[in-house]
Amino acid sequence: MAGVTAPPDRAGVTAPPDPAGVTAPPVRTGSAGRRRVALLVAALTLCWGYAAFLTARDAADLLRVRTLSTSLGQPTDALILSLQTERRLTAAALAEPGARPATLAAQRADTDAAIAKLRAFNTGTDLRLAGAQEVRDRAAELIRRLDTLDPLRRSVDAGGLDREQATTAYTEMIDAGFAVYAGQWTSRETRLIEQTRSFVALARAREVLAREDTLLTGALTARRVTSADRARLADLVAAQRFVRAEAAAALPPPERDRYRTLVGGDGLTALRALEDQLAAPGDDAEEIPAIPPQVWRAAVEPVLADLRDLVAAGVRDSVERATPATVSVVVRTGLVGGLGFIVVMAAIVGALGATRRPARRPVDQTDPPESIQPPHPSDHTPAAGQTPAPDQTPAAGQPHPGDQNRPLDRNRPLVRTGPGDQLRPGDRQVGDGSPSGASRLARDDLFLQLSRRNQVLLRQQLTLLDAMERRETDAEELADLFRVDHLTTRIRRNVERLITAAGARPARRWRRPVPLIDVVRGAAGEVAEYERVLVSSAWAGSLAGPAVLDLTHLLAELIENALDCSPPDSTVRVSVQFRDHGCLIVVLDDGPGLAPEALAGVNSLLREPPPVRPPGAGHGLHGAALAAGRWNVRVELAPGHRGGTAARVLIPAALLAGPGGPGGEQATMELPAVDPQGPPDGPADGPVPEPAPQPAAAGPTRRTGPAARITLPNRRRPQ
Amino acid sequence: MTSHGHPAVRAGLDDEDAWYDDDAGPVVRPYAMTSGRTRPVRPELDLISQVMTCPDVRGADQLSPEQTEIIERCRRPLSVAEIGAALNLPVGTVRVLVGDLLDAGLVETREPPLLTELPSENLLEALLAGLRAL
């Protein structure tokens, strides 16, 4: 699209890179087919990439959960269990000074083994755990806490700690263990994670019961339950019952049923009775309990074991229940990844095939509708509805019959001068019946259908953006919405160009006239650096509806080209001059300008565009020339009077309403002669009767006046 | 339009997918009206700022169509939110456009009534008492 002011031989060099990559690359040697296919392949790749990302994320989540639960979950679970037992045995040992039960030493060894396993996880690197950083951090925190275990044991052995202090130290370590489970294990919430969380909650309820156990074991072993012990016990019993009920409510149905059985069973009933008895306030401050520690052990041990079984079995079963889903996720990942890849590869192969045959794109511009028909003074093609059948000889004036259906010879002269060679609406070139022609038509048809669907999607997206922009009151958020809006509009332009190039009409159409200034601003909004475009404000007149889309795209090409060919900190000015036979829109830039012979080459292409884009020319230039030809609009490039290039678009009065129209006459208009030097301070583009204040008359970066600044303040590139 | 010609056109999907005039959506997207700016040069403008055209301003022909319409509509005071609704534009865009008009001295704003201009506490209490007495 940057090809208008760029001569064909240096076209690929002048265009700056397009930051968003939405418009076509600056390389101009490809065929129109390649461009279209590349767009399609890009869209396909994007769709596939997203689908593959979604399913791959699910698969990665599952892999991560599995890896985490074997390498971290199970060791942590074993460690918590060991610490709970060691805490209880420590409390018992401290209650009986002098006693050094062998069970405590054995338990300490067990705990050390569990810690060793956890350390192995922490030091190991497992690529499958990429993304589980939060969980790893929590595991590291747990291990840091475990470093205090040895000093704690030494203090216990030396008698430097009482029962309560030692218990609290162990409890803190166990809490750090549970914190590992609270980390985010997956990138999003799944049912499996939700269920796992309910089991963790039940395990925590069991931990409260274990604290109760530790407290009572210590007190009963010491054969003295103080009132402080009793108060703590009452707290723990209440907390334990509440947390347990809460956790049970969240369990999946099978485990909830098992839990209900457990609650109604003998074990929990006996435990509840014992708890109530022990927590009941006694008469004395210190009472020698009638209950020996063995009775408590016998009551609490089965419940602890039952709860543990319930948690372990629940976790195992919920994983099993999720397995069919897991299998389907893996299958889906394979399907999306593999099949999608095959489809994309097939599309690329097809694209390469298309580029090997320089496509003769049959451009069939169907008739512009309704009242206004584009005038074709020199056109000999039949009127709409009388279009010849594909096998009919083309209209007189064509070089020779059948020429347009032959693959283009690369060495053939591309800029032809015969007047009948211009493509007109109603012209039609379809496949010549050869197999390649037929398959090409089928493929073109597919492109067209997909582009039309994209058109519908883009319309929905813009409608949504309209609503969001109206709701938004925050300037930053609105600026982002505007960026999305701008990108969407640029994509829409490309899709519409694709549809036009395929010989069909885009869906956006106008019957009523549209103000010229809106057409120009709409065109400016369709290009990348629209902030650099200054539109002069003094515009009147409207453009006939049917011509709006073609002229919007034509002006967008010229504006984009002017932006591409000028320094990034300069402005591009668009102004209008009304004349007797129409109006002249001038797009002026501050670029280096073009050599006279390059200018002549571009102008000849603009004047007489061949129906098929020559390999040297950009699609933008060619498409703009074809659009201009459809509406009898003259486009010409001329040197600006202060350097740079002025693109001049002469719109006939027949297309105008308001000033300059509706003349109705389709006079053949001559562009005014262009003086390469130009008057030193006059308007930028030749002799103009009414020198209205135009931004075009301003210096390269100067603004013309307050109003022009108000309309389009020049904002520098946001990047 | 007729759908003769290219097979792809004949394949249909042509007229049923056409949107005419207003259905085709705005020709100028809102971002293009302000060059993408969303922050007004006058930050004090908010949704309820009352905008009024300066008395001596007549049709200024150097303005964008939207600004011309704002000038015309604000012959009587309108809030920024009302202008947005009348022009069917995002409030953010209206704030920028009005900010530029303010800067050019074509419109002025009246801030919403201050607390001191509101009925006094005594009056409100008297009103409340009266209502209770009903």
Image (cartoon, rainbow, N blue to C red):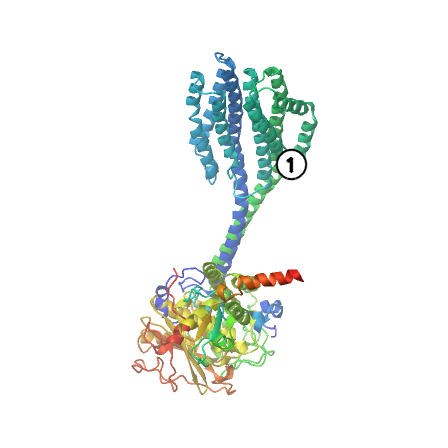
- Closer to the camera, B103 or B15? B103
Residue type for callout 1: Ala
Q: Is residue A682 above or below residue A65?
A: below
Q: Residue at x 40, y 63 (%)?
A: A26
Is residue A167 visible to the viewer in this orientation of the structure? yes
Q: Element type at marker 1?
A: helix
Nearest the eye: A367 or B49: B49
How busy is the neighbourhood of tag 1: few (under 14 within 10 Å), some, or many (20 plus)? some
Up-down relation of residue A399 to residue A218 (above or below): below
> Eyeballing the image, is A169 above or below A134?
above
Q: Which residue is mark 1?
A: A249
Residue A318 locus on image (x, y percent): 62, 35
Q: Quadrant of residue A246?
A: top right
Residue A18: x percent and y percent?
Answer: 40, 61
Q: Is residue A399 visible?
A: no
Task: Determine whether, in the image, residue A488 is placed left or right of residue A295.
Answer: left
Q: Position of residue A486 (x, y in %)?
A: 47, 64
Q: Nearer the viewer, residue A227 or B98?
A: A227
Q: Tell me the chain of label 1.
A: A
Picture quadrant of residue A16? bottom left
Image point 52% across, 43% down: which residue? A187
The quadrant the C terminus of chain B occupies is bottom right
Vertical comparison of B59 with A461: above or below = below
Q: Quadrant of the N terminus of chain B?
A: bottom right
